[in-house]
Image: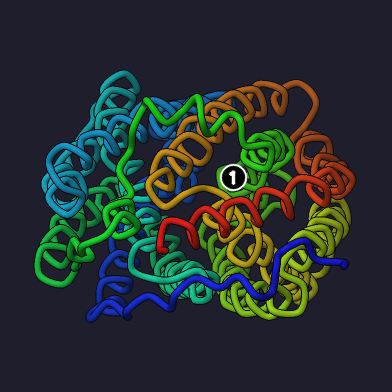
Amino acid sequence: MSDLVNPEVHQPEPQKVEGRWRSLFALAFSSVIDNSEGGLINNLFPLIRQSFEMSLGALGVFTSISRFARMLFGPLWAMAADKFGRKKVLVFITGVWGIWTALAGLAQNYTQLVILYTIGTIGTVASEPIANGILADLFDSKERGKAYGTIRSVTGLAGVILIPLIGQLANVENGWRIGMIIFGVMSVVSGVLISFFVKEPEEREGSLDEASKNKFQLSKVPELLKNKTFLLLGGTLFLVTSLILFSYMVTFLVDVRGYATDEANNIMAIFVLGWMVSSLVGGLLGDWVDKKSPTKGRIALMQVYMALFALVSFLAMQIPWSDVGMYIIWFVFGAIGSIGFSGCALPMLSNVVPPEMSGTAFSLLYSFLQGLISAVYSLTVGFLAERYGLQKVMLWTITIPYALNVFYWFLLYKTYPKDLAANQAALAEAEE
């Protein structure tokens, strides 16, 4: 038998949660604002650099701040959500906390900007792990790929619209300050939307329903560490460096390709448009290959995705193109960029850990570990780029790691089927 999952073992179809799609889009709006708040530094860094006479290494400092905040405060916010309620915490950190971003726009020197930006970032990193946990409760395993893909696509569509508008701030005096104030206010609006539209699944009777609360629990960490697929998914993050790309893309296009800041943001918008497409397609592809081969389909799709990502990243960043060619290649790059994570990595993690450990698993991998890795990488890239040039550094920190990751994922063909079968059997037994 090629697939180790017993086709006769089925989980009872869970009841659809009313208002789950409305909740998803409210969470997506929150994600858009949080991403835009953090991304303002990246999108307008050429202007901020001029305002405070900073070097390229300063961009590494700012990007590492957001990554370290993700690592340290992501799990802490998840624990707060466990204690006080996920919706209440989201309203506070997504809404009220936005005032710090607005204040960062009033910074008068580099030190003030670092302090205020750091405080603001502590809030913007909280929504993703909490939202992932809510989505895992709102959608069953057959729809999770679609759900994750949809929220990433909505975020991407908003980016397509907002990034060129942010780029136009480059043509306004103190435009970066205006941007921070605007998005600080919008953060408050997102908190209001969450308050009105996000609905957490109601507690139902039964052990599995109790588990669906999806709480973050430190006591569950030792058990998670026994899960080989969980450990391998953690290991793959050392070779997932796309977050560096988002941090340095505009500055790369300005410094290496010679574009003005507003035009560089236009190219980034085209990239994000492609990213939106890949997020939706990736979720649908992931669900489709999972039906064809529940134990191997998502793994194979992930490998194809990473091989294409490595190839197109080389073409986009190592070869000079005409203006039209730049828009085309960066769109293609984006159209590949998110296939693997919406369709493969995120659903796979949900499928191999018990529901009551889902929040802990997402927080440990995608807040703590990925935050630590990307913080160190982002900080290092800034200073390496000053010495060796941004183009060469992009080759060694983005293209090559993704190529190596293709081979790393062969390890999951052995562990994922076993952990998937074990989790499904445990869920079926609990239902009985």
Using residue 377 as the reference point, say whether residue 2 is left or right of it.
right
Decide: is 316 above or below 55. Answer: below
Q: Is residue 156 visible?
A: no
Q: Which residue is mark 1?
A: 243
Q: Is residue 416 above or below residue 377?
A: below
**Quadrant location of residue 315?**
bottom right
| Looking at the image, residue 12 lies above or below residue 350 | below
Residue at 30% x, 64% y is 27
Q: Amino acid at mark 1?
A: Leu
Task: Determine which quarter of the picture holds residue 334.
Answer: bottom right
* Element class at badge 1: helix
Q: Quadrant of residue 30?
A: bottom left
How is the structure coloured here?
rainbow
In the rendering, at what x and y percent does residue 338 appear?
A: 63, 63
Residue 216 in view here: yes
The picture places residue 114, in percent across and down from the top left corner, at 33, 24
Viewer-proximal residue, 9 or 176?
9
Q: Where's the C terminus, which quadrant?
A: bottom left
Q: Is residue 80 left or right of residue 195?
A: right
Q: Residue at x 77, y 59 (%)?
A: 299
Quadrant, the N terminus: bottom right
Against 228, is 171 above or below? Answer: below
**Viewer-nearest residue: 367 or 103:** 367
Residue 74: percent from the left, percent from the top? 36, 35
Tell me residue 274's x, y (percent): 63, 73
For the residue pair 168 and 207, the one nearer the viewer reads as 207
**Residue at horizontal 18 percent and vertical 65 percent from the top:** 202
Please report the residue visible at 17 percent of the width from the left and 54 percent of the height from the top.
87
Frontmost residue, 426 versus 212 = 426
Q: Is residue 200 left or right of residue 244?
A: left
